[in-house]
Image (spheres, grey):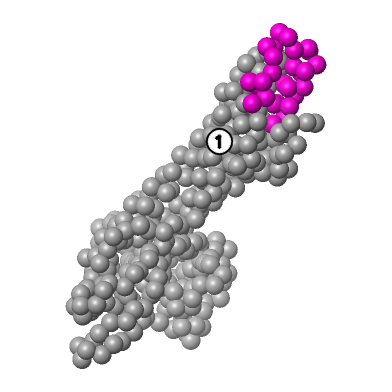
Amino acid sequence: MAGPWNRMSSKQLSFGNMAKIWHETETTLDSTSPREQQDENDTMKQYLRNKNLVLEFLHSDLNPHHLQYHWNKVHLLKKCYFYLKFEPRHVCVRDQNNMMIFADILQIANPCQLQKIKKVGRKQTEIQLALLTELLEQLERGREELSRYVQICDVEAFLSQWNLNIKRVLKLSMFLSKLISLEEPRKLHVKHSLVSQIHLGGALHPPITFTLYTKKPPIFDRTESFACQTWAQLKWFTESQESHLERWQLEMKLVPDDSQTEPGYHQTQEVISNPCVINHLIPGRSYEFKVRRSDTHTLVYSQWYDCIVLKTKTHPAEDTKEAPSRSLMRRLTRPTPSVKWFNEKGE
């Protein structure tokens, strides 16, 4: 088949290819004689070529599986934790003795300036996630409109709407390119004086670039998390290269029981172990557990957390899991200097 159809990629129509096809199609339409002077065969060829062009776009770039892949990616991004990355991370500054030292940016950063940069990062992340959702919705609507268009069987009606719809294809291809570029965290463009002049000692502020990066959220392992009569084990999935010293914020809440009159409570603890064993639970009660990544100086955005509800056994005979040994209990629940507990009565 002749024309721009042969120039299309069999896998994906890039924005550049779509622009070229649009230009050639527009030129072809402008140079042909009026439709009434064309024979029926030429008109049918043009109809089939144009229809195949739209079908190829629908079956490649805008096929449902492709769009669902991007939806899944955006849904995961909305659950991720966004962090600031500094380049370089260490700079040369003068100490109190006027000696040059190699210092970590976070140790000499101006706290107010750091908060301003984090605020910019958070705003950029919120805009990025909103744009991703909007672009996907536009692509979904565009697919529906093009699907209705290719179902037109009347040749004259189809060709009369061609200019409008080839522009729509080009626009949707541009949206898709924008979507893919936004699915990765971006560089922050911000004016700052992150390092105080006290540390710089009159030297010029070093060039520092800021980018955002993500970490996946912890998600409870529903198979390995369970409750016995007075204790529960919690385990969550993390990234494959996760540090063993990663800190997690674990929240436990006693679910209110209509038959009970005592006030509810919840506790929040920072832990470094995974799995984690929680002791001193009330038999026959339901507990809601939430897990998050602990806050850090570079965290700029986090909205989502995983939640699981476990019910303790009423009698020891109901326990099917073996109680952990004392040495294991000490290892899994051993407090660190940074462990924080908060009790709130009446929750």
When the figure is inspected, residue 212 is found, relative to residue 331, above or below; the finding is above
- From the image, tell me which residue sits under label 1: 172
Magenta run includes residue 314: no
Q: Secondary structure at mark 1?
A: helix
Examine the residues drawn in magenta and state their main secondary structure: helix
The stretch of residues the image draws in magenta is 27-53
Near-viewer residue (52 or 25): 25
Queried whether the magenta region covers residue 35, the answer comes back as yes
Give me the residue at 25% from left, 90% from top. Answer: 99
Q: Amino acid at mark 1?
A: Leu
Q: Is residue 196 left or right of residue 61?
A: left
Front position in the image: 202 or 341:
202
With respect to residue 144, does 157 lie above or below?
Answer: above
Q: On the rendered image, what quadrant is the C terminus found in?
A: bottom left
Q: Is residue 5 above or below residue 66?
A: above
- Residue at 39 percent of width and 53 percent of height: 125
Would you identify the image quadrant in which residue 9 lies? Answer: top right
- How many callouts does the rendering have? 1
Label 1 Cα crowd, 10 Å radius (few <14 / some 14-19 / many 20+): many
In this view of the protein, can residue 228 be seen by the observer?
no
Q: Would residue 23 be seen by someone viewing this image from the given angle?
A: yes
Q: Is residue 54 left or right of residue 133?
A: right
Residue 331 appears at what percent x and percent y?
A: 46, 83
**Quadrant where the N terminus lies?**
top right
Q: Nearer the viewer, residue 71 or 340?
A: 71
